[in-house]
């Protein structure tokens, strides 16, 4: 799947089909992972610039100043002469680029999809932030900021293996968050395993996702 014509019209911006798409982010899944899933589902070619935490100066000391991004941040996207930042903004661009508008959902469900999407995106950031804290503060963040949101997701998902009848951004973002929660807090995850494990498995069995997870491109936690 990809561009068949010499150019691809995206939000009134013409992109040459042979322009290399570069996604820049930390060498961790986190907020960059849904973007990778959108590209993998479309089998759209892209390359990555991954910044490690131990080599953060590559971003802060060099690329942040030199890439000429309007609002320098990670993740960033460079596609030909076009550059943008902010993860949700990039996700919207990629959906248009790869013609996967179905991921938004249909009718009023679009707003529910975004509700789940933004809650999960923020929760992923909170889980990561908690890992940087000392034990007492970490436990406090887990109890007050993370577990209550996880329980809300559990309530909304209920016994379903997808939030809606078809795959949407809600599933992509929720998978990213729940998988990260499972890896980061395996003991606490167990109380949710009955509801979340089938959901995670269904997503992982999507052929292109399965192939991606088995490839060297996938950053394993």
Image: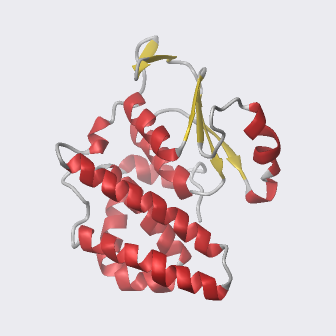
Q: Residue at x 46, y 58 (%)?
A: 121
Give the number of marks.
Answer: 0
Q: Residue at x 66, y 52 (%)?
A: 26
Work out which residue is located at the far bottom of the displayed protein and give it: 136
State the image coordinates of residue 197 (x, y, percent, origin top left): 35, 73
Residue 32, placed above or below residue 221:
above
State the image coordinates of residue 181 (x, y, percent, origin top left): 48, 72
The quarter holding residue 18 reads top right
State the image coordinates of residue 208 (x, y, percent, origin top left): 41, 46
The quarter holding residue 38 reads top left
Q: Is residue 1 in sight in this rendering?
A: no
- Drawn side of residue 187 relative to residue 119, left or right: right
Front position in the image: 128 or 8: 128
Q: Residue at x 57, y 21 (%)?
A: 19
Quarter of the image for the C terminus: give it.
bottom right
- Drawn side of residue 52 relative to residue 116, left or right: right
- Drawn side of residue 110 relative to residue 78, left or right: left
Quarter of the image for the N terminus: give it.
top left
By what rule are the colours in the image chosen? secondary structure
Q: Is residue 220 in sight in this rendering?
A: yes
Residue 207, placed above or below residue 18:
below
The quarter holding residue 92 reads top left
Work out which residue is located at the far top of the displayed protein and give it: 6
Front position in the image: 188 or 111: 111
Q: Residue at x 54, y 63 (%)?
A: 125
State the image coordinates of residue 77 (x, y, percent, origin top left): 58, 35
């Amino acid at each position: 799947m990809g561009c068949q014509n010499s150019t691809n019209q995206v939000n009134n911006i013409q992109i040459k089909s042979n322009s290399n798409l570069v996604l820049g982010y930390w060498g961790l899944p986190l907020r960059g992972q849904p973007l990778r899933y959108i590209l993998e589902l479309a089998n759209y070619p892209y390359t990555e610039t991954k910044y490690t935490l131990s080599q953060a100066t590559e971003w802060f000391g060099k690329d942040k100043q030199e890439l000429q991004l309007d609002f320098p941040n990670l993740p960033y996207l460079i596609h030909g002469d076009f550059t943008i930042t902010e993860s949700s903004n990039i996700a919207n661009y990629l959906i248009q680029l790869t013609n996967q508008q179905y991921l938004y959902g249909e009718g009023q469900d679009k707003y529910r999809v975004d509700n789940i999407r933004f809650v999960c995106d923020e929760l992923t950031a909170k889980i990561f932030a908690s890992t940087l804290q000392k034990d007492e503060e970490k436990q406090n963040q887990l109890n007050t900021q993370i577990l209550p949101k996880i329980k809300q997701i559990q309530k909304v998902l209920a016994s379903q293996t997808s939030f809606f009848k078809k795959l949407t951004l809600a599933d992509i973002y929720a998978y990213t968050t729940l998988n990260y929660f499972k890896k980061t807090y395996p003991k606490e995850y167990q109380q949710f395993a009955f509801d979340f494990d089938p959901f995670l498995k269904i997503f992982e069995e999507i052929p292109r996702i399965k192939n991606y997870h088995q490839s060297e491109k996938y950053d394993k936690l």
